[in-house]
Image (spheres, rainbow, N blue to C red):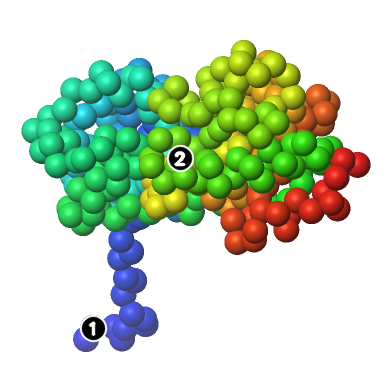
């Protein structure tokens, strides 16, 4: 006679496998670590000359591809039974001209009216979604990188800096809506530099060459941008570049941008008397920069 059953058989749980499209910098490494803490296995697609080789240790499995090998990327994720995909880390924009598109990427590129950041990345995300690979925000795994609102430096913007933020904010939103860039530099209500393919740091350095010291850097989220795949980023390196360029104020869009090494960045900004302020996109800029935000 068979012994009585003492309980129900254990249900097999489906392993959680995250597909990581890993660009440059530390962001892919932080996302991989955060995903592992949440119980995910991480498989990554890394790019020659772009992704840090540290990804080989940060992820469980990695393939290295050239820019444009979209079909290889999709097949790898499908073979690894990936359900969710995240994009993390930038691709060097000038390097993006050295693309080696496969047939799938060629078809995608031919269908685009623009190959700027948001248009291209949104099209890639749509290709993944069509293959049942759900694209999710990387911030799900690194929520601490959300940029905070308010004055985070000891010094608050002076009147001239406040005026430049109020002047420049709607302009960078217009530029962003055209999918050109996320950053401008302003001095005395004059736009001295606009970000394009060169990136934020080079924009800041160019502004320093053109405007001299004491100018304001403004960085925002592009209207219509897909927040799952391309968020503006700033951090310690941004402040270091501002010091080199002799910039005096940084205004960014809070909650819609990434802030790396924030504590170190703010400490460095304080040592160099740089004002840093996060603008809440849900409130009018002029309300947040009223006279109570004068230099203290």
Q: Quadrant of residue 184?
A: top right
Q: Is residue 191 left or right of residue 292?
A: left
Quadrant containing the C terminus in the rendered view: top right
Image coords of residue 61 (percent x, y): 32, 35
Query: Residue, x 56% and y 17% (percent of image)?
Result: 206
**Other-residue count near label 1 (Cα within 10 Å), few / some / many at <14 / 14–19 / ≥20:** few
Q: Residue furthest right?
A: 296
Comes first in the chain, label 2 or label 1 = 1
Where 227 falls versus 261 (above or below)? Answer: below
Query: How far apart are labels 2 and 1 at the CA level?
Result: 75 Å
Image coords of residue 12 (percent x, y): 30, 65
Q: Is residue 288 left or right of residue 253?
A: right
Using the image, tell me which numbered label, if any, was put on residue 175: 2
Q: Quadrant of residue 203?
A: top right
Image coords of residue 165 (percent x, y): 67, 42
Using the image, tell me which numbered label, if any, was put on residue 231: none
Q: Residue furthest front?
A: 189
Quadrant containing the N terminus in the rendered view: bottom left
**60 or 145: nearer the viewer:** 145
Q: Is residue 248 left or right of residue 279?
A: right
Determine which residue is flagged by label 1.
2
Residue 263 seen anywhere in this rendered image of the structure: no
**55 or 101: nearer the viewer:** 101
Where 294 falls versus 238 (above or below)? Answer: below
Q: Quadrant of residue 213?
A: top right
């Amino acid at each position: 006679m068979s012994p009585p059953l003492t309980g129900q058989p254990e249900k097999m749980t489906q392993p959680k496998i995250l597909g990581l499209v890993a660009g440059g910098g530390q962001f892919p490494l932080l996302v991989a670590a955060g995903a592992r803490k949440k119980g995910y296995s991480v498989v990554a697609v890394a790019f020659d000359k772009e992704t840090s080789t540290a990804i080989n240790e940060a992820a469980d499995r990695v393939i290295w591809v050239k820019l444009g090998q979209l079909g290889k990327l999709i097949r790898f994720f499908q073979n690894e039974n990936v359900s969710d995909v995240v994009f993390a880390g930038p691709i060097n924009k000038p390097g993006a001209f050295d693309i080696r598109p496969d047939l799938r990427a060629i078809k995608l590129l031919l269908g685009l009216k623009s190959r700027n950041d948001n248009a291209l990345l949104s099209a890639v995300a749509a290709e993944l979604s069509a293959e049942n690979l759900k694209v999710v925000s990387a911030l799900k795994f690194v929520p601490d990188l959300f940029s905070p609102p308010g004055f985070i430096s000891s010094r608050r913007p002076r009147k001239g800096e406040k005026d430049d933020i109020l002047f420049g904010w709607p302009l960078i939103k217009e530029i962003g809506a055209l999918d050109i860039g996320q950053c401008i530099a302003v001095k005395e209500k004059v736009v001295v530099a606009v970000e394009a393919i060169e990136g934020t740091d080079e924009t800041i350095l160019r502004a320093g060459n053109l405007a001299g010291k004491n100018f304001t850097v403004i960085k925002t989220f592009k209207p219509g941008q897909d927040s799952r795949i391309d968020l503006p980023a700033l951090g310690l390196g941004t402040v270091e570049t501002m010091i080199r360029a002799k910039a005096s104020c940084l205004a960014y869009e809070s909650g819609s941008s990434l802030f790396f090494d924030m504590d170190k960045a703010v400490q460095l900004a304080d040592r160099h008397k740089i004002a840093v302020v996060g603008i809440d996109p849900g409130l009018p800029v002029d309300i947040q920069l009223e006279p109570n935000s004068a230099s203290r």
